[in-house]
Amino acid sequence: MAGTRVIFYHKHHTSARTRFLLMRHGGVCAPDPLPTLSQIIEKEVGAADDRDKVALHPAAPIRAVEQGLGLGSGDVEAQGSFRVKVDAPGGEIQVFLARFTAIDPPFDLAERIDGRFIDLTQARSLTPTELEMLRCAYEYILG
């Protein structure tokens, strides 16, 4: 699904420590980085106000990336009321959010894909577009 990306995160059940999966390519969008010059054009965070809109359901793109990473069914949960639309060279990209469901972050997965988990404070090297998406995601996650 070329027009979609997924940001994966883990929020600890007791401490609420939130970490994002940084991919091998140096960004948080999976499976591929956002193209250079990408810009956010729309943020849908929370309950949908415009129920007449037709929107792509996040389950299919999240499942595709989940399988590509070698995760089992149920290892992540789609955060259906979070969606960011990005204007990119080549067309619009929709970015979805998925939460790892395990008690601890899957560090073995991160190591296997040559990635790592980062806190929001460690995201300074990301592009301005990804930083803005993480800010929106963090606000959504913490409610």
Image (cartoon, rainbow, N blue to C red):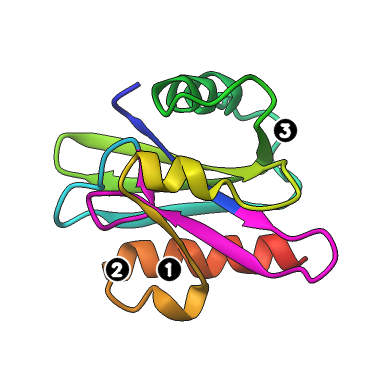
Check the image and report above or below for 71 versus 47: above
Q: Earlier in the sequence, mark 1 or mark 2?
A: 2
- Mark 3 or 1: the one toward you: 1
Check the image and report above or below for 38 versus 132: above
Amino acid found under the numbered disc labelled 2: Leu
Answer left or right for 40 relative to 47: left
**Residue depicted at x 50% and y 27%:** 66
- Mark 1 or 2: the one toward you: 2
Amino acid found under the numbered disc labelled 3: Arg
Q: Secondary structure at mark 3?
A: loop
Q: CA distance from mark 2 to mark 3?
A: 33 Å
- Dot 1: within a 10 Å radius of its alpha carbon, few (fewer than 14), some, or many (20 or more) residues? some
Q: Which residue is mark 3?
A: 51
Amino acid found under the numbered disc labelled 1: Glu
| Disc number for residue 126 | 2
- Region of the chain picked out in magenta, as a range: 10-30
